Amino acid sequence: MAIKQISVFLENKPGMLDAMTAVLANAGISLRALSLAETKDFGIVRMIVYDVYETATVLKDNEYIFSMTPVVAVMIPDVVGGLNKVLAALAKAQVNLEYMYSTLAGKESGNAYMILRVEDVQKAEETLRAGGFRLADQDTMSELA
């Protein structure tokens, strides 16, 4: 049930992110989640999209360097301690969390999805399902608007 994250490597210069998102927008690609990490010389744009194949094709055709990574998307209820319950379940199962970022779970749901990059996707998914947490798949991402 893991979803695919696309990571695009960009030079850390003014206008580079604008240029990449313009390419995606002109191709009709809608972003579902996005994270930007940077160093002095380059940045990594991590994103979730509905149509991974189409996005990869557009990026390749426009000569962007990118990779795909399996990640877990877990729904976090909008309550105090909602995120902590997810993190506690992963910690108890000894699942290492490398990074995470969030996206809203829809217009009126009152929830968010945390996108989790973990060392062991299968173990993380099994742990979260056993804890009663709702996981998203690639199709679920199409519903986020």
Image (cartoon, grey):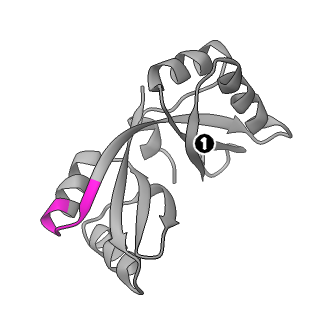
| Residue 129 screen position, x and y as percent | 59, 17
Up the image or down, 121 lies above or below 31; here it is above
Picture coordinates of residue 102, whole percent (x, y): 60, 50
- The magenta segment is 60-66
Q: Is residue 135 left or right of residue 61?
A: right
* Residue 121 rendering spot, x and y as whole percentages: 46, 26
30, 7: nearer the viewer: 7
Q: Quadrant of residue 130?
A: top right
Q: Is residue 130 above or below residue 9?
A: above
What quarter of the picture does the N terminus occupy? Answer: top left
Return the residue found at the far bottom: 14
Q: Residue 125, percent across and down?
A: 52, 22
Q: Amino acid at mark 1?
A: Tyr
- Magenta stretch containing residue 97, yes or no? no
Answer with left or right where residue 43 lies relative to residue 112: left
In the image, what residue occupies the spot 54% across and 15% down?
A: 126
In-image side of 120 versus 25 (left or right)? right
Q: Residue at x 59, y 25 (%)?
A: 95
Taking the view exactly as shown, the residue that stands out farthest to the right is: 80
Most extreme residue toward the front is 40
Q: Magenta includes 62? A: yes
Instruction: Give whichever of 74, 104 is nearer the camera.
Output: 74
| Number of residue marks | 1
Rate crowding at label 1 as few (under 14), some (14 to 19) or many (20 or more) other CA atoms within 10 Å: many
> SS at mark 1?
strand
Q: Looking at the picture, tell me which residue is in the foreground, 98 or 48.
A: 98
Name the residue beneath numbered marker 1: 113
The residue sitting at 39% across, 60% down in the picture is 30
Q: Residue furthest top?
A: 130
